[in-house]
Amino acid sequence: MPDQPAFEPLHQAHAIEQVALIINFQRPLDVRLLRAARDAVGNPADLPARAELRAYALQVGANMMPAAAAVSGPVVQGGPAPIAGFSFMRMRPDGSEEIEFQVNRHQISFRTMLYTRWAKVVAQAQKLFDAVLPVFLNHSPITAIAMNYADKFVCLASPGECNAHTLLRKDSPYIAPNVFEANDLWHCHTGAFSRPDEQTKRLITVNVDLLADKIEEKDRTVLSISSILTDGFNNPGYSPTELTLDTGSDFVFQRFDTLHSLDKVVLGSIITPSAAQRIALEQ
C-alpha cells in the first residue's frame, strides 16, 4: 500500500496561523475615555487602516412594545448605534486583515497573521498596549489576560486519504481517545480551570479539529489546533490584583511571556515529538 499523503505545517518554519493577545477590564469605558484611548494610539504607520466599531442593541420579547402589539423574535432598538470601539489594521491585497489592534469598551486586543518570532510580536504589541493601558488602568481593575494561538497542519488531499493521527499523541490530555478510531472528520473541544497562584484563576481551552477544505478548487485536509489560555484576576476567593501605571505594563507582559511558555507545553502535549521538532517548538 502506498504511503498516505503527509501533513505539513502551515508555514515552512512553523504552523501558526495567528496569535492574539487580549486584556479584559471590569468596567467599560465611556465614549469620552474610549476616544481618549483612540487618540493615545495615534496614527501608527504600520497600521494605516481605521475602523469605528458600533454596537447594535437587540431586545427580545414584548417589553419594547404595548402588549397588544407584541411580536415574537428579536427587535432592533431604535436610535443611533453607540460607539463600541476603534480598530487599527493593516490589510492584505485581498482585503483580509493582516494585523489588527482593537480598543473597545471592555477590552484591548492585538492580533497578527504574520507570526515570525515571539520577541517581534511582543515588541509590536507592547508599543500599542502601553499607549492605552493608562486610560484603562485609571478607570478599572483588570479581569483577565489571555492568549490565543491557532496552529494548522495541512494535507493536500481529501480527508479519506490523510491520516492526522500520525501528528497526535495518543496520551494527550487534550484529545478524547475515540478520535483515534475515527475515519472521517472530527472535533475535540476541552477546557478546565486551575489555580496556579493565589491571584490567578486560569482557564486552558483547547479545540482540535480535523476539517475538510479547498484551496484553488483542490481538496485539502486541515488539522487545526486552537489554544486559548486565560488568566483571570480579582475573582472571589482569590487575592486581589492591583495594578498601577508604573506596574501595569510589566505585569501584563510578564504574564504574556508566561502564557506563551505554557502554550508551548500545551501544544507539545498534543502533537508528537517528531511534529514538534518539525516546527521547532522548543526554540
Image (cartoon, helix red, strand yellow):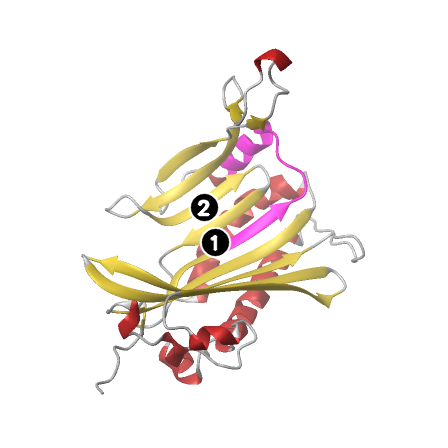
Task: Tell whether label 2 touches label 1 (CB within 8 Å).
Answer: yes
Q: Quadrant of the N terminus?
A: bottom left
In the picture as drawn, the residue positioned furthest to the left comes out as 217
Circle 1: residue type = Ala
Q: Is residue 84 above or below residue 226?
A: above
Question: Which is more toward the observer, 261 or 219?
Answer: 219
Local crowd at mark 1 within 10 Å, few (<14), some, or many (≥20)? many
Q: Residue, x 74% and y 53% (percent of image)? A: 235
Quadrant hosting residue 221? bottom left
Q: Earlier in the sequence, mark 1 or mark 2?
A: 2
Mark 1 secondary-structure assignment: helix
User: Magenta includes 25?
Assistant: yes
Mark 2 secondary-structure assignment: strand
- Provide the residue designation for mark 2: 101
Q: Nearer the viewer, mark 1 or mark 2?
A: 2
Circle 2: residue type = Phe
User: Which span is picked out in magenta?
Assistant: 21-40
Residue 174 image offset from top left, x and y in percent: 54, 71
Quadrant hosting residue 19? bottom left
Question: What mark, if any, has residue 76 been given in the picture?
Answer: none
- Provide the residue designation for mark 1: 125
User: Magenta includes 22?
Assistant: yes
Question: Which is more toward the observer, 183 or 54?
Answer: 183
Question: Which is more toward the observer, 69 or 48?
Answer: 69
In the picture as drawn, the residue positioned furthest to the bottom comes out as 1
Quadrant hosting residue 89? top left
Give the spatial CA distance, label 1 vs label 2.
Answer: 8 Å
Q: Is residue 193 left or right of residue 101?
A: right
Q: Is residue 88 above or below residue 269?
A: above
Q: Is residue 127 above or below residue 59?
A: below
Q: Residue, x 41% and y 39% (percent of image)? A: 43
